[in-house]
Image (cartoon, grey):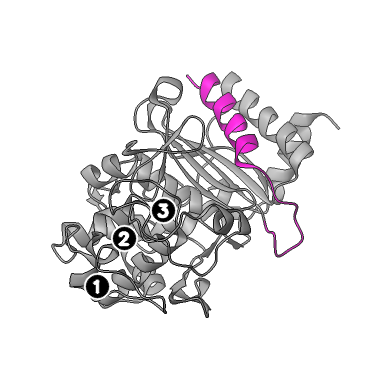
Amino acid sequence: MAPRLILAVVLCLLPASIALADPAGPWQRAAPSAWSDAASRAVQAYAATHRPTAVMVVRDGLVVAAWGDVGRKVNLRSVRKSLIGMLYGIGVAEGRIDLSRTLEQLGIDDEPPALTQAEKRATLRDLLMARSGVYHAAAYETSDIRAKRPARGSHPPGTFWFYNNWDFNVLGTIYRKVMGEDIFASFERRIAHPIGMEDFSAHDGRYVREAVSIHPAYPFSMSARDLARFGLLVQERGRWNGRQIVPAAWIEQAAAALSATDREGRGYGYLWWSLSSAQWGAGAALASGYGGQALAVVPSKHLVVVQTVDLEGGARGLRTTAFLALARAIADGAP
């Protein structure tokens, strides 16, 4: 069967809502064009090789290509960090979150060996940038990150970037404490419902606790079509159907290369990976999770590309570099 015909069959099998939205309603399909045909062929070829659970390509709020089960909810792993990052932007705009507050002022500590006075000088902004300098054991860490974790006290707060689950988990604790809201209920009310997510509810999040730390992780399960809608919100600089949900200035800061990292071509902002503006255009950003969960936002091309991989369902984990190669090829061909 020819690739275009295969893709047409796949799209016909997707839930009806995928074939219907723009930012004001359900998803709609983009009109066929030479570029959309090429993008569809690229997605089909990629899926045939890598077998993700779902892939979606959205441009100007319209579905250009889709493959797989876009309605299946999947544990997004570390994409959770970029999701809570937008909640922080809302909290800051409301004047309820002050990024200059220190861990000491916020009453944050952990299991013995407890935090030192030097570690407690880390600010909320330091945590958002993964620069706390607190290298306490954390829940939900990969073995790779655990092996790379610096020694306690080796870097003062604010001076050194390290992709640190302790920082990310503590941000969840602080959000619940300062905002007085459950993370998942807050995301549903403040973001998912206003932008019309089709599948997500507060029940699709859970807290993961481990004995090494009092601060739980907070993984989200989400469908590819809902993650694409979240990406479109970011692409639109936080505005949805005439309403500013997340401040535009916050999204610009989150996607900026505030820190150099150990990943080639990527910086780090506020809980988002920034992509090289020379290669991707201004404001391009990536949310990435273990095993191939990925969301690329490319504002210069009005483009959102999403991938989910259901590791619990037996899918093989995929490398982010493979996804980025697909997203880059699609972006390079976009008008």
Q: Earlier in the sequence, mark 2 or mark 3?
A: 3
Q: Is residue 297 left or right of residue 148?
A: left
Q: What's drawn in magenta, residue-wise?
A: 310-335
Q: Nearer the viewer, residue 110 or 165?
A: 110
Residue 193 sits in which quadrant?
Answer: bottom left
Pointer 2 and pointer 1: residues touching (CB < 8 Å)? yes
Give me the disc on residue 82.
Answer: 3
- Label 1 is placed on what type of residue? Met
Note whether 316 is above or below 31 in the view shown.
below
Residue 66 sits in which quadrant?
Answer: top right
Marks 2 and 1, how far apart in space? 10 Å
Quarter of the image containing the N terminus? top right
- Secondary structure beneath label 2: helix
Residue 260 visible in the shown view: yes
Marks 3 and 1, how far apart in space? 18 Å
Give neighbour class at mark 3: few <14, some 14-19, many 20+ (Cα, 10 Å): many
Within the magenta stretch, is there residue 329? yes
Give neighbour class at mark 2: few <14, some 14-19, many 20+ (Cα, 10 Å): many
Q: Is residue 115 left or right of residue 22?
A: left
Residue 195 sits in which quadrant?
Answer: bottom left
- Label 2 is placed on what type of residue? Leu
Note whether 14 is above or below 268 in the view shown.
below
Give me the disc on residue 304.
Answer: none
Residue at 30%, 70% (x, y): give it: 174
Q: Nearer the viewer, residue 155 or 96?
A: 155
Q: Which residue is mark 2?
A: 87
Residue at 13%, 62% (x, y): give it: 95
Q: Which residue is mark 1?
A: 179
Give neighbour class at mark 1: few <14, some 14-19, many 20+ (Cα, 10 Å): some
- Secondary structure beneath label 1: helix
